[in-house]
Image (spheres, rainbow, N blue to C red):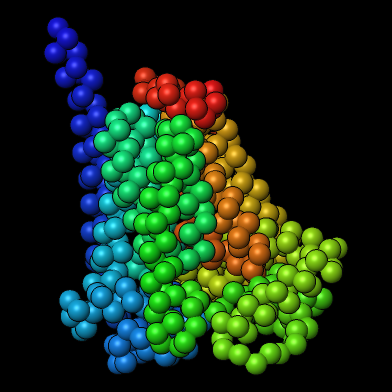
Amino acid sequence: MASKSKRALMKPKREFKKTIFYWVVAIFIVKLITIFSIQGNAWLGADGENYISAYEALAKDGLFSSESLLHYWPAGYPIFLLVLSFLGKAWLFATLTILQSLIYSAAVFYFVYQLSKTKVRNYSFLVMLFLLLNPTLSLASICVGYESLAASGLLITLGLLIQDLTSNSSRVFKRNVILSAITIGFISFLQPRLLLSGLVGIAIWVLVRKPIKSAILVMIVAISIVAVSPALLMLRNQNANGFSAISTNLGITMNLGAGDEADGSYRPKEKFGVPCTTIEGNAAQQDSHLVRCVIDWYLDNPIKSVELLTNKAIFFWSPWFGPEAVGSMARNPWLKVNPLVDIASNSEEGNKLIYGTVGKIISWGWILLSLTLLVIGFWRLWRIGGVEKVIGIFALSQIVLNWLIAMGTLGDHRQRLPILGLSIFLQAIGVKAMFKGKGSELVDGPALPSKAKADANLN
């Protein structure tokens, strides 16, 4: 009888695993068809030309090329392109977009399958649909840009966390923490801004699973693994340019979002930035000087600073299109088929409708609804407690920290892309929790390891 009961419980999980697989494969095939039907087998992201130029410099001059684009932007993504080019330069962009799409598909499959082992298993199908069918995030894998890989990496990391908590195995814990550190290291190699939030996420995980003394030792190992990526970028710049820096664009991006005439965004304007003296020195020294100058301006102008930080906080969550859209997502593939774009461009009346009062109301409604669903989704996981509570804390930590980091530079909704998978996850939970339709009830799932409960005081 016990054997039959066990098989009965296993069957739904196996069936759901097949369902996820079929959906993921179907969407991946659609992407493959799209890739081979577009010119060059890829769309250019916002910085696409710069990444390609940086890659060409690497291909021509070698890894230690002194091309300024390779230190102005982090060199990680161009180096990634260089590695892929070894498989065949003629097929570079087809290889890139197929690989990015494959990684995103695998990330969604792995994350949703691990989620199906928790008490919110009945939410998993909706989460999968939201992740696979979100046009901006899903189509980002066909663009030249790091964003899709970053979003995939964070989903994989959360999946590794869930697998560890649901297995309660010391072996799985060690393996998955190491895999997570490698994953965070890789996406930080592409975009170093993700380094801090990734390490905080791993720290939350480790503190939940281990006593403080053991947690410190594990974090030392994790930090050592993650630190390889910025160290490699600094080593490359030291050999190529004579200075140790990951990149040299922080000061400029901070300055674009600051100043008496600024609104916190990257918009064409006659005056922007803060008055700063120029100094002699290399690009890294000039960048550091500009960073200090902008920080000093913020401290000296607290009222304007609060206004700019508020604007940038809103811009981060602004829609991809419409009167309240602020950022560098003009090349968002979704805009190629978004019906609102056609309405706004085909007639003066349509333009007034989209960019007028009605459009502004809809845009603000979209922003508020997105944030509301995110909060509801997190609160739902928090109320459940145990494993689900830790999942919610991890996801929210990545979202909030990347939001705060973005506020320190300039307002751009494109900076939301790396954490879009996690925010969509919480929003899907929020939708299900709000409507409480059939299947929204909880199912039996693993409890948080008892030792972790005592150490972290989460319940």
Q: Is residue 247 left or right of residue 119?
A: right
Query: Percent position (x, y) of residue 449?
Result: 40, 24
Query: Percent position (x, y) of residue 168?
Result: 33, 28
Count of labels in the image: 0
Q: Is residue 39 left or right of residue 441?
A: left
**From the viewer's perspective, is residue 10 above or below residue 55?**
above
**From the viewer's perspective, is residue 170 above or below residue 301?**
above
**Can residue 164 be seen at all in this image of the molecule?**
yes
Q: Is residue 403 left or right of residue 278?
A: left
For image coordinates 44% across by 81% down, the residue present is 237
- For the N terminus, the image quarter is top left
Query: Percent position (x, y) of residue 262?
Result: 76, 75
- For the C terminus, the image quarter is top right
Query: Percent position (x, y) of residue 155?
Result: 39, 49
Q: Nearer the viewer, residue 154 or 215?
A: 215
**From the viewer's perspective, is residue 114 above or below residue 141?**
above
Where residue 97 sits, quadrant-wise, is: bottom left
Q: Residue furthest top?
A: 1
**From the viewer's perspective, is residue 246 above or below residue 309?**
below
Q: Nearer the viewer, residue 417 or 397?
A: 397
For image coordinates 19% across by 17% down, the residue present is 6
For image coordinates 60% across by 67% down, the residue present is 412
For image coordinates 44% across by 82% down, the residue present is 238
**Can residue 147 be seen at all in this image of the molecule?**
no
Q: Nearer the viewer, residue 213 or 245?
A: 213
Where residue 45 sits, quadrant-wise, is: bottom left
